[in-house]
Amino acid sequence: MFDIGLPEALVLAILALVIFGEKLPSVAQQAGRTLRQLRQMAQSAQTDLREGLGPEFKDFDPRDLNPKSFVRKHLFEDDDDPLGVRRLREELDDDFAEPLGPPGRGRSEMLGQDERPPFDDEAT
């Protein structure tokens, strides 16, 4: 979540000591208490939501409402893969892995690096 290294953490700790001084232990205690209350509120909200939805949604996880995780769960995680999404994705990966030549020409008839494509005077 936060990309804080050791030097940044030390600077933050020194700033906290300078700013709060003797009050730092009580500020840290209050922050911990507030964080604990927030966690309890979130947990009780999840419990109330599960109870309100009923037994049909016993496996419901609020994180599944995130669009990214919803798509990943229902399209790309294939326990039984009824629609063949994995096979389709593999076929598409195979199709686009090899370079395509111009239409009407086989791979052996591809143009060389300095070769010019055919030109049709009547078509232009």
Image (cartoon, rainbow, N blue to C red):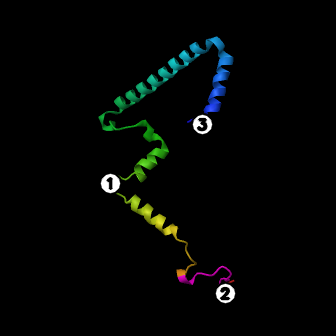
Residue at 40% over, 50% down: 74
Q: Which residues are magenta?
A: 108-122
Instruction: Estimate the x, y position of residue 30 in percent, counting from the top left.
Output: 55, 16
* Residue placed under numbered mark 3 in the picture: 3
| Callout 2–callout 3 Cβ contact below 8 Å | no
Q: In front of the other: label 2 or label 1?
A: 1
Q: Is residue 47 left or right of residue 13?
A: left
Magenta run includes residue 113: yes
Q: Looking at this view, is 107 or 20 the one in front?
A: 20
Q: How far across and down, in percent of the image, does residue 49 sit?
A: 39, 30
The label shown at residue 69 is none
Disc 2 marks a residue whose amino acid type is Asp
Quadrant where the C terminus lies? bottom right
Q: Quadrant of the N terminus?
A: top right
Whether pointer 1 and pointer 3 mark residues with C-beta atoms closer than 8 Å, the reply is no
Q: Mostly what secondary structure, the magenta segment?
A: loop
* Residue wearing tag 2: 120
Left or right: residue 98 compared with residue 7: left
Looking at the image, is 99 positioned above or below residue 55? below
Q: Which residue is mark 1?
A: 80
Most distant residue in the left direction: 55
